[in-house]
Image: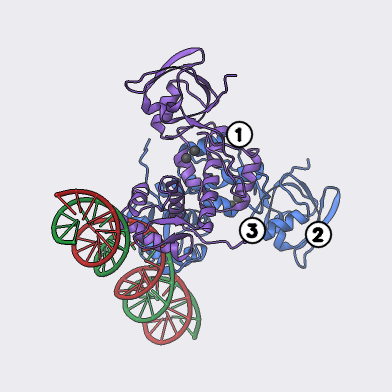
Chain colours: A purple, B blue, C green, D red
Amino acid sequence: MCVIKIEMTLSEENYLKSIFHLEKKYVRGVSTNALAEEMETKASSVTDMIKKLSEKNLVNYKKYQGVKLSEKGNSIAVQIIRKHRLWEYFLVEKLDFNWDEVHDIAEQLEHIKSDELISKLDKFLEYPKRDPHGDPIPDAEGNFANLEKKILAEFNEGDQGICVGVKDSSAAFLQYLDRNKIKLGKSITILEKEQFDGSMILKMNNKELTISKVAANNIYLKPVALD
Amino acid sequence: MCVIKIEMTLSEENYLKSIFHLEKKYVRGVSTNALAEEMETKASSVTDMIKKLSEKNLVNYKKYQGVKLSEKGNSIAVQIIRKHRLWEYFLVEKLDFNWDEVHDIAEQLEHIKSDELISKLDKFLEYPKRDPHGDPIPDAEGNFANLEKKILAEFNEGDQGICVGVKDSSAAFLQYLDRNKIKLGKSITILEKEQFDGSMILKMNNKELTISKVAANNIYLKPVALD
DNA sequence: TATTATTTTTAGACAAATCTAAAAATTTGT
DNA sequence: ACAAATTTTTAGATTTGTCTAAAAATAATA
Ligand SMILES: [Mn+2]
Ligand SMILES: [Mn+2]
Ligand SMILES: [Mn+2]
Ligand SMILES: [Mn+2]
């Protein structure tokens, strides 16, 4: 068991986290430009930082080939995501924040350095498995509990499911969901699916609700088997 | 009511906090060297930062004359201290940290930027008035509840008091207090005071306990009137 | 394949916060 | 009051992370 603590700056941590998220989409290596856009910075800055991370063996990098996280880089990224999501859970469940208000604060809190703090916070929160947006919270060893989920837009008429997450976690979208009473845990049945524009008529809380394809593309449901 | 938000770097915030604490001792202005020692940096760095803070009207500064906090600088310093102490209270009361383990983590947490966060944390904690070391937690308006307290070393034989705070909050001293079962809230009676070295024999928990003058100089008691 | 367009890297500059070394101002001691 | 000691400031360098502009490599297109 390797217990070497690597000194990480706030900037380095944010880069690792962004690479982690982008690797889902850019499986064969995250491009400099993609990373620049995600980090809201310039490509030249990204190149500088990638060299630094590569020097520290946190990413694998060959010029013009994009980056991938190393084993160690991946594990650091996962720990930051663990912290981010635990803090988001704390803010919503204990401090009574709404789910659209917590991301920016968690962006700061995720950089607080103390293993003991996170372990005690996790215990205090009784080891939550999902953050307020339905995203899995990795455990202390970095394991994600993966849950079955499918994008609402891919369901068909007559299908049923339980809302378990959102793809877009922007405040604007979360507030749209609030206004339409869509929350995690809600049971949803697809009544109609419009071929023309992909909009859907749903049944939820015994009421009917129409949502656009754009919205349906950003809601995750866990399918419910209808015997 | 002035609501101008001033952008503060972590370093600027730490300087303001240090000046605030040193002003208690250096009433006619905090010297560059004193600040350098407190901040564990060089005098030249202090001069640079003082100029920057002076530029922002957070301190009053004249060359070679030392610094004092301005009205605005003072109010920012107090808000940082409020955050520090609220977080310390949270760490001890909710996350089950010991009082000697929380300072370094609070040093990080005090810089998290969100007024809403602190106001909700304060509410969650039910508006505590003292931190784990007995220091007062300023309210949202910056008012300190001042409590009657006197250094234990200044008490006389036969006097009685309740432990309400510590002057030295170092882990070493706090652990010494733990080993001797000295906690906030404990009732203490001074049985004997040795003229030679200032050490004291105390009665606490119906047991006798001898402590040095050094220790007695770092414990605050609230005097109890013995009619 | 040759040319053009795009992406990525390099080179050089900048702001923030720090440092060392030296100069200037103040304080202390006789 | 004057010299010595101390404190404080200035000058110039360094580190980190960023930027712009230009060069180099790769990808797309005709
Ligand atoms: Mn988030
Ligand atoms: Mn989240
Ligand atoms: Mn503290
Ligand atoms: Mn404290």
Q: Of helix, strand and loop, which one carries label 2?
A: strand
At label 1, counting other C-alpha atoms closer than 10 Å, the crowd grade (few under 14, some 14-19, many 20 or more) is few
Q: Earlier in the sequence, mark 3 or mark 1?
A: 1
Closer to the N terminus: mark 2 or mark 1? 1
- Residue occupying the point 54% across, 61% down: A6
Q: Where is mark 3, residue-wise?
A: B170
The residue that disc 2 covers is: B210
Dot 3: element: loop
**Quadrant into which the N terminus of chain B falls:** top left
What element does badge 1 sit on?
Answer: loop
- Real-space Cα distance between discs 2 and 1? 37 Å
Q: Residues within 10 Å of mark 3 (few under 14, many from 20)?
A: some
Say which label, 2 or 3, has the lower sequence index.
3
| Residue on which disc 1 sits | B126
* Residue at image coords 35%, 65%: B63
In this view, the residue in front, B73 or A190, is A190
Task: Pinpoint residue A182: horizontal percent, then vertical percent.
Answer: 47, 23
- The quadrant in which the C terminus of chain B is found is top right
Residue at the (37%, 51%) spot, across then down: A35
Callouts 2 and 3 on one subunit:
yes
Q: Amino acid at mark 1?
A: Glu
Q: CA distance from mark 3 to mark 1?
A: 27 Å
Picture quadrant of residue A4: bottom right
